[in-house]
């Protein structure tokens, strides 16, 4: 079964750091484009970052320079390292896979999400 | 930045048709995809490439593009109570600078 499971969320003080993990099963993360998408409480979806199969990475302007996406081939897992966290980073963070096979931009598999709360 | 605009809410009676619009300057050059999100759950893909339906999605969900215009539409025919959810369109800008842009979201209420 194709599945994504996020872990690592929690309560963190402003200025702190947190690393989210997204473990994949049923497919190999290095062959597909993998993204992080977040949703602040009561708000809409916001794309955060992507790591392409070749390893290149891109970020939303709001997190550029603070967040880093990476992957571990041996664990078939992607990560989101979040530094200098702000209250406005409070959200449920989802990882998602872009559908392979030429369906550019289509996010076909989503994890259940992990909640990050930035507060003192 | 690039924006996709949706109406905040749509209300429909059971069995009727709900239509949700999504406006963006890059349409029709870029495809639109649609996601359904129920409270406390992750988004689920319901339409991709303007009008294609993934396996397992009911036929009452359909999508269309205006052809030459800058609006795409998600249509839910014969709405059922279980269709009450938030719906988001998603696309990219004309240059691909912003690879994944989500619409503002529409709350569909089944009366």
Image (tube, rainbow, N blue to C red):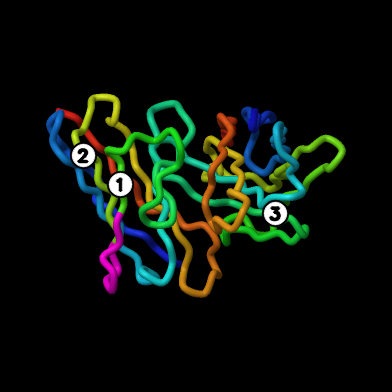
Dot in front, 1 or 3: 1
**Residue at image location 25% in from the left, 49% down from the top:** B20
Where residue A67 sits in the image (x, y, percent)?
Answer: 69, 51
Q: Earlier in the sequence, mark 2 or mark 1?
A: 1
SS at circle 1 = strand
Q: Separation of disc 2 and disc 3 at Cα?
A: 37 Å
**Could you say which is closer to the camera, residue A83 or residue B42?**
B42
Q: Is residue A69 left or right of residue A101?
A: right
Residue A113: numbered disc: none
Kindly identify which chain the residue marked by label 3 belongs to: A
Q: Is residue B98 left or right of residue A4?
A: left
Residue A51: numbered disc: 3
Q: Decide: marks 1, 3 in contact (CB < 8 A)?
A: no
Residue position marked by numbered label 2 in the rendering: B77
- The N terminus of chain A: image quadrant: top right
Residue B62: numbered disc: 1
**What range is drawn magenta here?**
B64-71
Residue at the extreme right of the image, as rendered: A74
Q: Decide: marks 2, 1 in contact (CB < 8 A)?
A: yes
**Residue at image location 70% in from the left, 44% down from the top:** A80
The image quadrant of residue B60 is top left
Same chain under badges 2 and 1? The reply is yes
Kindly identify which chain the residue marked by label 2 belongs to: B
Where residue A64 sits in the image (x, y, percent)?
Answer: 65, 59
SS at circle 2 = loop
**Could you say which is closer to the camera, residue A34 or residue A13?**
A34
Mark 3 neighbour class, 10 Å CA radius: few under 14, some 14 to 19, many 20 or more: many
Kindly identify which chain the residue marked by label 1 belongs to: B
Q: Separation of disc 2 and disc 1 at Cα?
A: 8 Å
Q: Separation of disc 1 and disc 3 at Cα?
A: 30 Å
């Amino acid at each position: 079964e194709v599945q994504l499971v996020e872990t690592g969320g929690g309560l963190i003080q402003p200025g702190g750091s947190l690393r989210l993990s997204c473990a994949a099963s049923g497919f190999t993360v290095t062959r597909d484009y993998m993204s992080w998408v977040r949703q602040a409480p009561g708000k809409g979806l916001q794309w955060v970052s992507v790591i392409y199969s070749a390893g290149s990475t891109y970020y939303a302007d709001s997190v550029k320079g603070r967040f880093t996406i990476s992957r571990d081939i041996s664990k078939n897992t992607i990560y989101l390292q979040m530094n200098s966290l702000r209250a406005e980073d409070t959200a449920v963070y989802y990882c998602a896979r872009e559908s392979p096979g030429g369906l550019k931009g289509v996010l076909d598999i989503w994890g259940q999400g992990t909640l990050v709360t930035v507060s003192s | 930045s690039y924006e996709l605009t949706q109406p905040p809410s749509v209300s429909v009676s059971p069995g009727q048709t709900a239509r949700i619009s999504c406006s963006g300057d890059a349409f029709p050059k870029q495809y639109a995809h649609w996601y359904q999100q129920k409270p406390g759950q992750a988004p689920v893909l319901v339409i991709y490439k303007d009008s294609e339906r993934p396996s397992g999605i009911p036929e009452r969900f359909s999508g269309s593009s205006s052809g030459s215009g800058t609006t795409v539409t998600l249509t839910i025919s014969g709405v059922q109570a279980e269709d009450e959810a938030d719906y988001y369109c998603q696309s990219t800008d004309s240059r691909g600078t912003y690879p994944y842009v989500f619409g503002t979201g529409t709350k569909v209420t089944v009366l």
